[in-house]
């Protein structure tokens, strides 16, 4: 009976390990995507400031910066959690505790929150860029 329980715990630990790797991949994807959006943001920044959109630009920039800080914190948390899980996998005498399961749940919730915040910020950025592009087109000399 103990062998079956150990096998089940081992399978659950492997699942936690794979989930942790997926989290890291997701956070790295957000990191790459944020670099793209930051470049997009930087290219419209000077145009937007000239269009009296400084407050909008400042808000989106602050949101991107906050998201980056949260993502970096979460990435550090995931890497640490991954080391803990890997050490348990390597040393069968270590036991899975409620702390590990609790930390796993905290990270899951933080990732969900991060992705929701990321989605909102991107929506705001898209709306800002679209309004600036529309305004630029309306002011273009060749516009009928």
Image (cartoon, grey):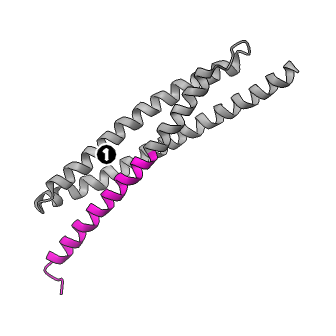
* Vertical position of residue 55 compared to residue 112: above or below: below
Residue toward you, 46 or 6: 6
> Is residue 62 a member of the stretch shown in magenta?
no
Residue farthest top in this picture:
93
Instruction: Name the residue rendered at 45%, 33% in the picture.
Output: 74
Instruction: Name the residue rendered at 45%, 47% in the picture.
Output: 115
Residue 119, position as x, y percentages in the image: 41, 53
Residue toward you, 108 or 134: 108
Residue 87 picture quarter = top right
Counting the numbered discs, the total is: 1
Q: Mark yes or no: residue 33 visible.
A: no
Residue toward you, 47 or 66: 66
Residue toward you, 112 or 127: 112
Residue that carries the numbered disc 1 in the rendered image: 64
Q: Main secondary structure of the magenta part?
A: helix
Q: Which residues are magenta?
A: 115-144
Residue 65, position as x, y percentages in the image: 29, 41
Residue 38, position as x, y percentages in the image: 31, 49
Instruction: Name the residue rendered at 52%, 33% in the picture.
Output: 107
**Does 23 sit left or right of 8 as displayed?**
left
Q: Mark yes or no: residue 64 visible.
A: yes
């Amino acid at each position: 009976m103990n062998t079956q329980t150990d096998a089940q715990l081992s399978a659950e630990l492997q699942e936690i390990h794979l989930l942790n790797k997926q989290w890291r991949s997701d956070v790295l994807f957000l990191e790459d995507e944020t670099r793209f959006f930051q470049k997009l943001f930087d290219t419209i920044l000077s145009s937007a400031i000239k269009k009296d959109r400084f407050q909008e630009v400042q808000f989106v920039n602050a949101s991107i910066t906050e998201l980056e800080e949260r993502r970096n914190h979460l990435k550090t948390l995931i890497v640490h959690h991954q080391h803990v899980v890997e050490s348990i996998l390597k040393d069968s005498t270590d036991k899975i505790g409620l702390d590990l399961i609790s930390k796993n749940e905290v990270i899951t919730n933080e990732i969900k929150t991060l992705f929701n915040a990321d989605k909102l910020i991107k929506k705001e950025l898209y709306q800002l860029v679209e309004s600036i592009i529309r305004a630029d087109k309306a002011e273009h000399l060749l516009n009928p």
